[in-house]
Image (cartoon, rainbow, N blue to C red):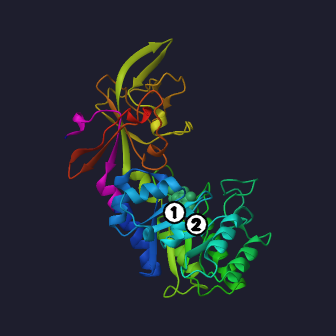
């Protein structure tokens, strides 16, 4: 299929871009830490099976944060021993994941108590990590997502809960295999990663954890092209690995990374066609067949990079690009638009691979088709459907 044959609106997976992102990310971290390293694909960032399966083909684990994501990864062919299980809602899947030798990062004291009760004196030795909640905002003022209120995931270091959790595991004869330190941040800066890695070192020293099997730094790295001057994968890898080597030995301790946006953001585009054009009191209003909720689910008015296909004349006429739903605020924000959109025009929005299709609902439009762009041609990977609305 050619571009003109695609049914719009649709997402387009760019095969080469995705492969390139994965190999570069993996390559830079392996160059710094060696081969004792694991990568988890963040399912919540993009839950299209093809994306997880390609990552698995590169040796990735599936990083999941709910029983439903765990089941999803299973249906994608991921064995329990290739799962990294995070998040606050493992519920009754906690035990199966532990028994099946998933990497299970305990998020709260209830989970610590539950595994201690279930596996005390058991022949099964689960692979357990503790997700650490520490005051990153104190070290990187203004940079964390929750500036002003504490981040709410993991077990608090400063109030002694982390030490209590360690003691509980020890008393139950359960080994602590690793630390999990994922943090989302506003800036995704190198300073954030230097601080996270330094905290892993500090905890290791304080609690004599140099024999840990793994340190899981999580995700949160930059992807996409919204911001000039963002750190490159190499900068992240150097910062994290240099800091961790201050205490952990790459021969003994596995480094785990859980990239989502870093590998996914630039790997999908979104294509939408013009439906109609009208003039309303001096404004040119262009309505397209897509909806902004497909590429900007929280409708922040931030400009999206795009390419116009079949553009009209160059013009500085102000144009409102509206989506096809009946919501007034369904508006696209193409970045630096220089041409008129005409009836034959299409917008190809870029950087649509992270936290976009995951949020698709069936509000007015069913979730769009997904195509694969590979070797110069397009193939349909998933057809849109209203089946999900029926029992
Ligand atoms: C969301 C999440 C990730 C991925 O985050 P990105 O910002 O998309 O890289 C990784 N690990 C955990 C635990 C997460 O919650």
Q: Earlier along the polypeptide chain: callout 1 or callout 2?
A: 2
Residue 111 screen position, x and y as percent? 66, 66
Residue 71 screen position, x and y as percent? 45, 56
**Rendering quarter of residue 205:** bottom right
Residue 297 screen position, x and y as percent? 52, 39
Q: Which residues are magenta?
A: 2-19
- Per the image, label 1 sits on a secondary structure element best described as loop
Say if the magenta span includes residue 13. Answer: yes
Within 10 Å of the Cα at label 1, are there few (<14), some (14-19), or many (20+) other Cα atoms?
some
Q: Residue at x 35, y 22 (%)?
A: 275
Query: In the image, is the residue at mark 1 within 8 Å of ligand 1 by its beta carbon?
Result: no
Q: Is residue 343 left or right of residue 209?
A: left
Q: Is residue 37 above or below residue 133?
A: below
Q: Is residue 236 above or below residue 326?
A: below
Q: Is residue 263 left or right of residue 182?
A: left
Is residue 99 visible to the viewer in this orientation of the structure? yes
Task: Identify the residue under disc 2.
Answer: 190
The one of 172 and 40 positioned closer to us in this rendering:
172
Q: Residue at x 54, y 39 (%)?
A: 302
Task: Give the distance between the C-alpha atoms of the residues marked 1 and 2, in whole angstroms.
Answer: 7 Å
Say if the magenta span includes residue 17. Answer: yes
Task: Identify the residue under disc 1.
Answer: 231
Quarter the N terminus occupies:
top left
- Quadrant of ligand 1: it is bottom right
Q: Is residue 294 left or right of residue 347?
A: right
């Amino acid at each position: 299929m050619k571009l003109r044959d695609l049914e719009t609106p649709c997402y387009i997976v760019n095969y080469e871009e995705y492969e390139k992102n994965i190999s570069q990310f993996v390559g830079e971290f392996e160059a710094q830490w060696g081969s004792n390293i694991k990568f988890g694909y963040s399912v919540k960032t993009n839950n299209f099976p093809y994306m997880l399966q390609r990552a698995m083909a590169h040796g990735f684990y599936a990083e999941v944060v709910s029983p439903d994501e765990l089941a999803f990864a299973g249906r994608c062919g991921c064995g329990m021993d290739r799962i990294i299980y995070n998040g606050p809602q493992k519920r009754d899947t906690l035990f199966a994941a532990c028994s099946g030798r998933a990497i299970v990062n305990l998020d709260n004291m209830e989970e610590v108590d539950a595994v201690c009760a279930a596996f005390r004196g058991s022949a099964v030795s689960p692979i357990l990590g503790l997700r650490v909640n520490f005051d990153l905002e104190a070290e990187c003022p203004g940079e964390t997502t929750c500036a002003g209120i504490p981040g709410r995931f993991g077990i608090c270091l400063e109030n002694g809960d982390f030490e209590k959790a360690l003691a509980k595991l020890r008393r139950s004869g359960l080994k602590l295999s690793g630390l999990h330190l994922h943090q989302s941040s506003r800036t995704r800066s190198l300073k954030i990663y230097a601080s996270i890695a330094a905290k892993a070192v500090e905890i290791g020293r304080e609690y004599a954890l140099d024999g840990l099997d793994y340190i899981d730094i999580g995700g949160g790295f930059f992807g996409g092209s919204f911001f000039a001057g963002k750190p490159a994968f190499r900068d992240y890898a150097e910062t994290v690995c240099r800091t961790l080597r201050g205490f952990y030995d790459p021969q003994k301790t596995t480094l785990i990374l859980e990239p989502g946006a870093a590998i996914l953001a630039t790997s999908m585009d979104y294509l939408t066609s013009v439906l109609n054009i009208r003039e309303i009191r001096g404004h040119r209003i262009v309505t397209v067949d897509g909806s902004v909720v497909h590429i900007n689910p929280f409708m922040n008015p931030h400009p999206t990079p795009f390419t116009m296909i079949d553009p009209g004349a160059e013009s500085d006429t102000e144009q409102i690009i509206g989506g096809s739903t009946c919501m007034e605020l369904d508006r696209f924000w193409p970045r630096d638009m220089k041409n008129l959109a005409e009836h034959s025009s299409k917008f190809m929005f870029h950087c649509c691979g992270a936290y976009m299709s995951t949020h698709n609902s069936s509000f007015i439009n069913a979730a769009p088709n997904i195509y694969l762009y590979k070797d110069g041609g397009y193939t349909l990977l998933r057809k849109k459907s209203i089946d999900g609305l029926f029992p």
